[in-house]
Amino acid sequence: MSRFDGKVGIITGAASGIGLAIAEQFAREGGHAVVADLNLDAAREAADRIASFGPQPMAVAMDVGDERQVEDGISAVMENFGRIDVLVSNAGIQIVKLMVEFPFSEWKKLLAIHLDGAFLTTRACLKHMYAQKSGAVVFVGSVHSKEASKLKAPYVTAKHGLIGLCKVLAKEGAEYNVRANVVCPGFVRTPLVDKQIPEQAKELGISEDEVVRNVMLKETVDGEFTTVEDVAEAVLYFAGFSSNALTGQSMVVSHGWFMQ
Ligand code: NAD
């Protein structure tokens, strides 16, 4: 008997990085993983791989910032599996620039994916979770849900915002046995981070090695990156917790970069 036997979990942005690791671990523990991503080909590839070791997965194309696509995607999951037990709101991007020159269009794009995306996917799943009288929503926040860094105005704003969204959901969802929590990772070596190392080096006028050592990992206790597996474990801890004792919370997984 595994923790997620027979459960259905939708993980957004699961074609890559952290979301992919969460989907894989969810499937290893018996769950039907729904790989929801902008990139349908990559989502299908991930789902095919997961099918080789886990229960029937599903790939869904979805831009989390698009209301219609989210509603259609969640309806397709309901048609296929008839229930939704877990939503991991994980899809995200990063854009690094000084605030003074941040284009408004890029500010809006980032907020649309992180905040509109979290709201829309949550809202679409909630009606089914409320009808079932059970469910868990886990938002993938960041150390930047609690701390700031230069060059990341919309990202830090959005990640702080997820904590507020989570707390409201914890209060509204309680009577339906729906819990909401946030996992806040430190730096994890995924395509999202690999892309920003040269960008930050350019913006800050330092080498890529200095970005890693003196910007990303400087405040950690051991100079190490957090791994996708570390984050998946924390997310699934929240997802698998079975009472409202643990709701409205956030957990930082960052090698001690941020201690609360
Ligand atoms: P990643 O780039 O490896 O994966 C992100 C995935 O999201 C991709 O598959 C991409 O196609 C998908 N995506 C992007 N926009 C989308 C949209 N509009 N709709 C649906 N899917 C979309 O990134 P990652 O590092 O795995 O990041 C995942 C989450 O973890 C993000 O929310 C990110 O902010 C957060 N996070 C990452 C780190 C890190 O260091 N990598 C640290 C803290 C938090």
Image: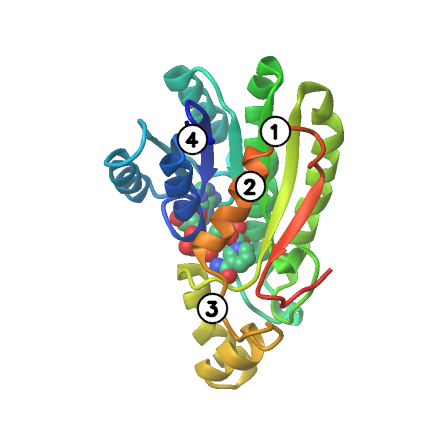
Question: Separation of disc 3 and disc 2 at Cα?
Answer: 29 Å
Q: Which residue is mark 2?
A: 237
The reply to whether callout 2 and callout 1 are in contact (CB within 8 Å) is no
Outermost residue toward the front?
Answer: 1
User: Of tags 3 and 1, which is closer to the observer?
Assistant: 1
Residue that mark 4 sits on: 2
Kindly indicate whether the residue at mark 2 contacts the one at mark 3 (C-beta within 8 angstroms).
no
Q: Secondary structure at mark 3?
A: helix
Residue 69 coordinates in the image, percent (x, y):
45, 30
Q: Is residue 24 left or right of residue 260?
A: left
The 10 Å Cα crowd at callout 1, few under 14, some 14 to 19, many 20 or more, is some
Lower sequence index among marks 3 and 4 = 4
Write down the residue under mark 1: 242
Image vertical order of residue 42 relative to residue 153, above or below: above
N-terminal-most mark, 3 or 1:
3
Residue pictured at 73% horizontal, 20% vertical: 175
Disc 4 residue type (three-letter):
Ser
Q: Earlier in the sequence, mark 2 or mark 1?
A: 2
**Ligand 1 under 8 Å from disc 4 Cβ:** no
| Mark 4 and mark 2: Cα distance apart in space | 13 Å
Does mark 3's beta carbon lie closer than 8 Å to ligand 1? no
Residue at image position (71%, 39%) is 248
Place of residue 114 in the rendered image (x, y in percent of width and height, measured from the top left): 57, 47
Q: Ligand 1 near label 2 (Cβ, under 8 Å)?
A: no
In the picture of the structure, the residue carrying the numbered disc 3 is 196
Q: Are marks 4 and 2 in contact (CB under 8 Å)?
A: no
Gap between marks 2 and 1, in whole Å? Answer: 10 Å
Circle 1: residue type: Ser
Q: Residues within 10 Å of mark 3 (few under 14, many from 20)?
A: some
**Spatial separation of the CA atoms under disc 4 and disc 1:** 14 Å
Task: Give the x, y percent position of residue 167.
Answer: 73, 38
Mark 4 vs 1, N-terminal side:
4
